[in-house]
Amino acid sequence: MDINIVREQTVTRVELAGSIDVEGAEVLKKNLGQLVGEGAREVELDFKGVHFIGSSGIGKLLLFYKNFTAQGGKIRILHLNSDLQALFKAIRLDRLFNIQ
């Protein structure tokens, strides 16, 4: 999995590509954890290049959500493909995350 972090004035965009499997989930956790520590306020998770996310990746997203929103942060998820949209809806992540 590849991650590219783009910091703009008020928003940090995290561009993801590849599979978020067990190994990718650890990379995701590390990078998202740094954003919490840096004091980011708004994060966009861009899933344009993601074709798979496993349960460990979902778990890391939920951990990030818990830690980031507890500090007043806002998260948006962008460009989910139709399969990932169906998954997020099935496990009700669409109720937690602002998906665009």
Image (cartoon, helix red, strand yellow):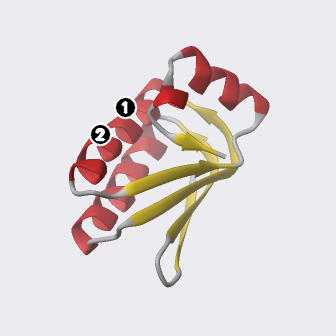
Give the residue type that dot 2 points to.
Leu
| Residue at screen point 49% across, 72% down | 11
Q: Are marks 2 and 1 in contact (CB under 8 Å)?
A: yes
Q: Seen from this angle, which residue lies furthest bottom? A: 9
Side of 41 where 92 appears, left or right:
right
* Relative depth, front residue between 75 and 57: 75
Percent from the top left, x then y, of residue 55?
45, 25
| Residue at screen point 29% across, 49% down | 69
* Relative depth, front residue between 20 and 43: 43
Give the residue type that dot 1 points to.
Gly
- Residue 54 visible to the viewer: no
Percent from the top left, x then y, of residue 14?
53, 63
- Residue 72, compared with residue 6, is above or below; it is above
Near mark 1 (Cα within 10 A), the count class, few <14, some 14-19 or many ≥20, is few
Percent from the top left, x then y, of residue 18?
65, 48
Where residue 52 sits, quadrant-wise, is: top right
Residue under numbered circle 2: 63
* Relative depth, front residue between 52 and 75: 75
- Tag 1, which secondary structure? helix
Near mark 2 (Cα within 10 A), the count class, few <14, some 14-19 or many ≥20, is some
| Residue at screen point 34% across, 70% down | 40
- Tag 2, which secondary structure? helix
Q: Which mark is residue 72?
A: none
Q: Which mark is residue 59?
A: 1
